[in-house]
């Protein structure tokens, strides 16, 4: 079974965004918005080559977009 959509919005999660999300390579949609994450977006998210939409507004993350996001050729909305 493959996940193609994952929403972890408004859950009051804290700490770094789990780098293991980068293993869900079939994802086309991911939102981590409205949480209390810290740190930066993990470079492992650049492994999500099927990702079309990524939302991280009001998530608590900061910093620069990882260079690995250049692999996200199907990205339409971020």
Image (spheres, rainbow, N blue to C red):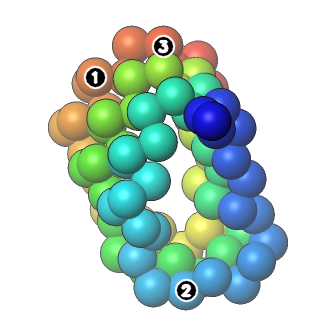
Upstream in sequence: badge 2 or badge 1: 2
Alpha carbon of mark 2 to alpha carbon of mark 3: how far?
Answer: 28 Å
Find residue 71 and name its label. 1
Residue 50 left/right relative to 39? right
Q: Are marks 2 and 3 in contact (CB under 8 Å)?
A: no
Please name the residue that numbered disc 2 is placed on.
Answer: 14
Question: Mark 3: which secondary structure?
Answer: loop
As displayed, is residue 51 above or below residue 57?
above
Q: Specify the quadrant of the image occupied by residue 68.
A: top left
- Please report the residue visible at 34 percent of the width from the left and 61 percent of the height from the top: 19
The spot of residue 11 in percent (x, y) is 76, 77
Alpha carbon of mark 1 to alpha carbon of mark 3: how far?
Answer: 9 Å
Q: Specify the quadrant of the image occupied by residue 57.
A: bottom right
Find residue 74 and name its label. 3
The spot of residue 26 in percent (x, y) is 52, 28
- Please report the residue visible at 45 percent of the width from the left and 85 percent of the height from the top: 15
């Amino acid at each position: 079974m493959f996940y193609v959509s994952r929403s972890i919005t408004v859950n009051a999660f804290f700490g770094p965004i789990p780098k293991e999300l980068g293993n869900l390579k079939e994802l086309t949609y991911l939102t981590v918005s409205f949480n209390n994450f810290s740190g930066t977006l993990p470079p492992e998210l650049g492994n999500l080559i099927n990702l079309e939409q990524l939302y991280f507004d009001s998530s608590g993350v900061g910093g620069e977009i990882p260079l690995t996001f250049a692999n996200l050729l199907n990205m339409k909305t971020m």
